[in-house]
Amino acid sequence: MILKEFEGKKLLTAVGLNIPRSVLISKGNINDINKAHSLKFPIFVKAQVLHGNRELESLIKKVENKENLKNEVECILNKKDRYGQEISHVIVEEMVEFTQAIYINISYSTKTRTPVIQYSEQGGTGMDDRGDGVSEFSISIIEGVKEFPIKPELLSVLQKLFTVFKNNDATLVEINPLAKTEKGYVCLDAKIELEDTANFRHEEWKEFGERSQIAKPASAIEKMAKEISRIDSRGVAGESFFEFNDGNIGVMASGGGASTLAMDALLSQGLKPANYTEYSGNPSRQKVYALTKLVLKLPNLEALYVVGSNANFTDIYETLSGVVDGIVEADLPNKFKVLIRRGGPRWQEAFEMVKERLKDKDIKLKLFGPDFSIVKTAKELRKMFEEDKYGNIN
Amino acid sequence: MAILINQNTHYLIQGITGKEGRRAVKWMKQLGSIVVAGVTPAKAGQEVDGVPVYNTVEQALVNHSDINATCIYAPPRFVLSATKEAIEASIPLIHIIAENVPTRDTAEILELANKKGVRVIGPSSIGVLCPGKSSMGSLGAGDKEGIVEPNEKGGVVVLAKSGGMSLTMSNMISSEGIAISTIVGLGGDKIACTTYADLLDDIQNDNEAKALVIVGEIGGSYEEDLAAAIKDKNFSKPVVVFISGKFAEHLPQGVAFGHAGAIVSKQFGTRDGKISALEEVGALIAQSPDDIVELLKTLE
């Protein structure tokens, strides 16, 4: 979960870090603007969005006097962010005079397999393209930050930032810039990402509410898929769901590795997936049924591609029962194509069941067991489409 | 010989009375593993499939001093405490199957394990299988079709992040008559307590390991680290690599793996980057999993 700047800054002040004086204004409470009149002008109006580099879209605006403030706030609240999401909040923040803008982030490195601090003397915009001049320090997750030889005066700020990082189960705490002022260091911005899997020890996260994981707003179908994944706590189904434009193949993949593999194979055959979603970890029949129903609602669908690796413990009979429940109910075009490739517990039994239950439907069905290559299933699916066009070419 | 586990591995199962724990005992025993004890707090005195249950790891060790590996079948929120118990007891090999373990907990587990000099596989690892010798975890669980044929003379070592792919790949290789010595599912979490590179010395030193198959994925730096380790350690056995994830390049912007925080490791993580790094150190690159088998055949 990516936090908005004002949410992140709350976590910073909770450990005693400095932030500029500011007022939060939401779309519904525009009158809160009056509170901003006590701030020292000029001030910045900053849109609260999930992405960075806000100045590129004029989502940060410097305002010189009170008279223009309301106009500018309304103007930004009426904009959309880079990915088309509504802007629900802005903060109005005092300008801070500083002598140096530093870049700091704490995250996990797969190189050292520890938390690391990344530090640059030159913070500000454009950090994404700047590899040079950034130094990296590994930190013990247990002992925290004990020293910071490159800039000892930052030690206390870093210790506080590390507390924010660890205690909130963050995967990223980025302060850019950290401003050096006459009165000490001030965090002018904050980008904080929390790790959803740790929500069992963070009751307080509920107040952040639902939000898009990614910067692009979730489509209606993507939102529904998320709800399906919460039907029960067994396995995963629909947790990741991406809808693609112009596709005609509904995809239900299983197993982390096999899922990406199946998508690679589809694309390499010139086929067009309408979505990507996966189920795994032995989910319930009901969950797979709900997910199948959802996939089959995608527009212009001509085929359903159910492909997974040889399962280690997912009950194939139960999960494919869910798939068939969804197919049976759906209103599908003639000659709708269904290709299933699965292996794992009870797969033979499951295949018999699929054949039996779909035999009276106008469906072209192909079933492949655990010995059949995942990659070749894409070729088989392409053949099914070609047969539609040119007749049986075998 | 084999890597990580063998006929002399004596297993403890933590979380043995849970549903997955019970299944694991049955399956591991079916594949010839010696499961000597289990632990579930407040369940001492019970038995699961003939295996005695204790309240703590310490009590299990008092009664079974031959325990030299443990499988953690606790739910994600209890993984840290269960694993700490095993590390404190100096059990040399620890397997964690749970998915969704917070990275903070994994980082702590890895730091403690490194200090103590014990090895942790996972989290989100399906397990390790030495066909015909021993099985740690749930690789192939419950499906007799999924059992990879044992071979006395050793064979290929298969390392994959994904549990499903480690089994699928091994089935494919095995069905072509190529022997497999060990299969390891390393888990696909951000922090893997054991990476491909961590196992290179074991594979180099094991005379039954003839070649190495890597089923990699985009994201992270473990494939790049492997390439560096192959070079540094002068690893001399053939390496065949497949990396999936081409499609991720088609995902809409904002879905990309990694984030702005990864500024200095920007060059890491892409499929092309991984492939060229491994190609440079002499690994054979398979364009598809089917290619892996073909490439292995050329080695014989």
Image (cartoon, coloured by chain):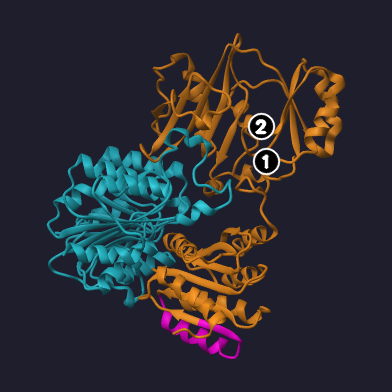
Chain colours: A orange, B cyan
Among the 4 quarters of the image, the one containing residue A245: bottom right
The answer, for residue A250, to whether it is visible in the render is yes
Amino acid residing under circle 2: Leu
Q: Name the residue under label 1.
A: A82
Q: Looking at the image, which is closer to me, A37 or B220?
A: B220
Magenta highlight on residue A355: yes
Q: Residues in magenta?
A: A345-365
Does the residue at mark 1 contact the one at mark 2 (Cβ under 8 Å)?
A: yes
| Mark 2 belongs to chain | A
- Helix, strand or loop at label 2? It is helix
Horizontal relation, residue A265 to residue B58: left or right: right
Which quadrant of the figure contains the C terminus of chain A?
A: bottom left
Please state the total of marks drawn on the protein image: 2
| Mark 1 belongs to chain | A
Instruction: Give the vertical position of A212 relative to B172 (above or below).
Output: above
Label 1 – label 2 distance at C-alpha: 9 Å
> Residue A355 at x, y = what percent?
51, 87
Magenta highlight on residue A303: no
The 10 Å Cα crowd at callout 1, few under 14, some 14 to 19, many 20 or more, is some
Q: Mark 2 points at which residue?
A: A56
Among the 4 quarters of the image, the one containing residue B281: top left
Amino acid residing under circle 1: Arg
Instruction: Give the vertical position of B98 relative to B192 (above or below).
Output: below
